[in-house]
Amino acid sequence: MKKIFLLLSFAFIFNLFSVADEGMWIPLFIKNNESRMKGMGMKISADDIYSTNHSSLKDAVVLFGRGCTGELISDEGLLITNHHCGYSQIQAHSTLENDYLKNGFWAQNRKEELVNKGLTVTFLVRMEDVTDLVLRNVDPKLTEAERAKAVEKNIKKICDEAVKGTHYQAVIKDFYNGNQYFLFVNEVFKDVRLVGAPPSSIGKFGGDADNWMWPRHTGDFSIFRIYAGKDNKPAEYAPDNVPYKPAKSFPVSIKGVEKGDFTFVYGFPGTTNQFATSYEVELIKELENPIAINMRDMRLKIIDARSKGSDLIRIQYAAKYANIANGWKKWIGENRGLQKLRTIDNKKKFEQAFEEWSLQNDALKKKYYYILPMYKDIYTQLYNSRRALKYFIEAGLGSEIIGFAWKFNNLVKLSHQKNADAKEIEKAVQLLQATTEEYFKNYDLETDRLLFINTMKAYYNSYNNENLPAGLAKIRDAFKEDFNGYTDFLFSKSALASKNKTMALLDGYQIKKLKKIEKDPAFVLASSLFTHYFDKVYPDLIRYEDQLDSLNRIYLQGLIEMQNEKTFYPDANLTLRVTYGKVDDYFPFDTTLDGIFEKEKLEYDDYQVHPKLRELYNARDFGRYGKNNTMPVCFIASNHTTGGNSGSPVINAEGQLIGINFDRNWEGTMSDLNYDASQCRNISLDMRYVLFIIDKFAGAGHLIDEMKIVQ
Ligand code: ARG
Ligand code: GLU
């Protein structure tokens, strides 16, 4: 209890000591930051940002899908997020005939809005500190596993009670490495339709070359609409659902932004690890990032070469490629940033100071002195497990056929049960049929074959001929390390490499067919790799990670006790946060439409300009959105953001929408482990450009009519 008091009381010291704009603040306590925010220029109150007594800006911000943010921009459920956040939906609706990726999509009326199966948006109804309840009767002497069980039990009870008799959903998440717990009561909408998306030459302008870079000219937005039942409550998709009426939506400002303007970002940052020890950072920087970067480098080259030769493959692999490339480039930037900041050395020095501090009296010594040696010990043992896991994910699963084959495991297991339940089997078969249908829509055999040869070889080599999983031992023993031969064998013999053959396996499935699946070479390999992981890697991994969880919790208590003048903010955990800063120029680059036409001269694939955009530019037809005879496109600011903040509203002093967050600068991507106020910036799309594209480019003025525009 005392430590919680400590955490909260620090918040009040904030105004005295804070200099940088670092921090991802909990909206429930945003009052503690209010005077600092007002000092920087904010005109609205903390209560306007988060309140449960009346509508507040939190009612206009949603978790979009499972990893992005979106915001409401009309009273008829219109929602805006990034193009890259809606990418898989836009991709899923795209075909060679209707290539919405390439040409964009604009629903001319509500009937034309496109349904997206499985897409949800989540509103926060309220949040509450439930630490005492979660830790009730949890003996501090329990092992980490026992503690987790006890905590789990309490959590279930609290959640059940919190939403009893409502249509809400409840989750509890831990903060400050398990030192504090918050309850989130959420409302989840399930009918979210695609309304509009610019062509990729705008929404993804600059592509992967510009990704994580400043200056930037990407029109990274897409528009959806939330639908509800007639009672305005969440409903499964139905044709007669009606546009959702939100409690709050953002007015959109076209007054523009200037360097030094106050701004804040309200959204769902996913993961940061600011309290990580030098050991953790070293493992990430020296081991995990290089493995992932190398493996992805190889895969990207293969997919890129195949996509260049075929529009179909380009469409099929667009979303997959973007995903692989995004992490690849981020980790390259992260490693450079960590190097430049000498993060490992600095953490080591800090850890030494921590040890010295803990030696000043017996009580502290007992509480904290053992921690760092123990970290060292655990990380030494953990090394191999983390290495194996990384290789498993990045190489073992680097071709798609392995992951796909493993999906048949459930059916195989069910079929083996003594009194196999026919209904359950039938359900499993149906699920696989649907999965197969989806899977092959975006599958190119030759691309996957190339991915397979290269990643499997790398995975094989990662074992240095020690303790090979049976599937890989077979490549050594039966195929004498002839990877081409083995790949030819697997892809020609496996039914799972062909849609027709897979469907034939499933069609009228009977337990007799079980043998066929079990003998399928892709299934045999997948099953060997997964079994090896579950039996040989996972048990150690989870044992050490559990020990780390417990250590991390105590270490953070120690950090707070030691730096009692410092304000701590919790690591990102995909819960709603506020971060604030100022519009910056970073480097004075041209980030108007002029810059787009400068880039076009470089003649890269990623810098092609849509003819309609050129027409508007040449005619200087910017309507009320332009400035100085050109069109502002993006801006940069000092808000502390991370993955998950994509699509977040960037808000001005008056609480109006001025931009949409979509990236960070490459030099700043180490901020997840080591924030640096002088280098870390967030990149946003200017709302004036968004409205210009909707209005002038797409001719979808009816959408603008729904919004409240502030001139
Ligand atoms: N880097 C941004 C983020 O982390 C944008 C990614 C999408 N864009 C791309 N070119 N892959 O999500
Ligand atoms: N593009 C990222 C996202 O999808 C945001 C950039 C970042 O990592 O800060 O959330």
Image (tube, helix red, strand yellow):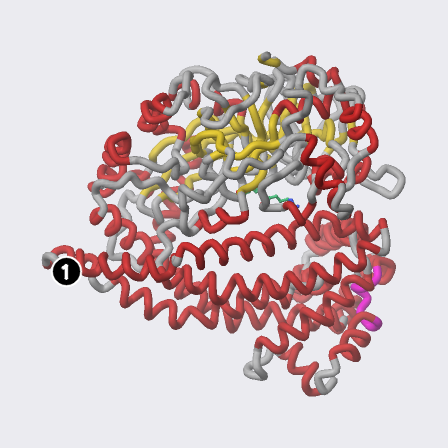
Report the residue marked by disc 1.
Answer: 359
Q: Secondary structure at mark 1?
A: loop
Q: Is residue 234 above or below residue 664?
A: above
Q: Give the side of residue 679 with respect to residue 467, left or right.
A: left
What residue is drawn where x is 48% and y is 69%?
385
User: How far from the left and from the top, in percent, is residue 407?
Assistant: 68, 59
Instruction: Give the percent coordinates (x, y) of residue 207.
Output: 69, 45
Front in this rendered view, residue 593 or 197:
593
| Furthest residue in direction right, as rendered | 97
Q: Position of residue 383 (x, y in %)?
A: 44, 70
Q: Is residue 459 left or right of residue 16?
A: right
Q: Residue at x 54, y 48 (%)?
A: 666
Horizontally, residue 498 falls left or right of residue 624, namely: right
Q: Position of residue 171 (x, y in %)?
A: 46, 38
Q: Nearer the viewer, residue 11 or 467?
A: 11
Q: Quadrant of the N terminus?
A: top left
Q: Which residues are magenta?
A: 492-498
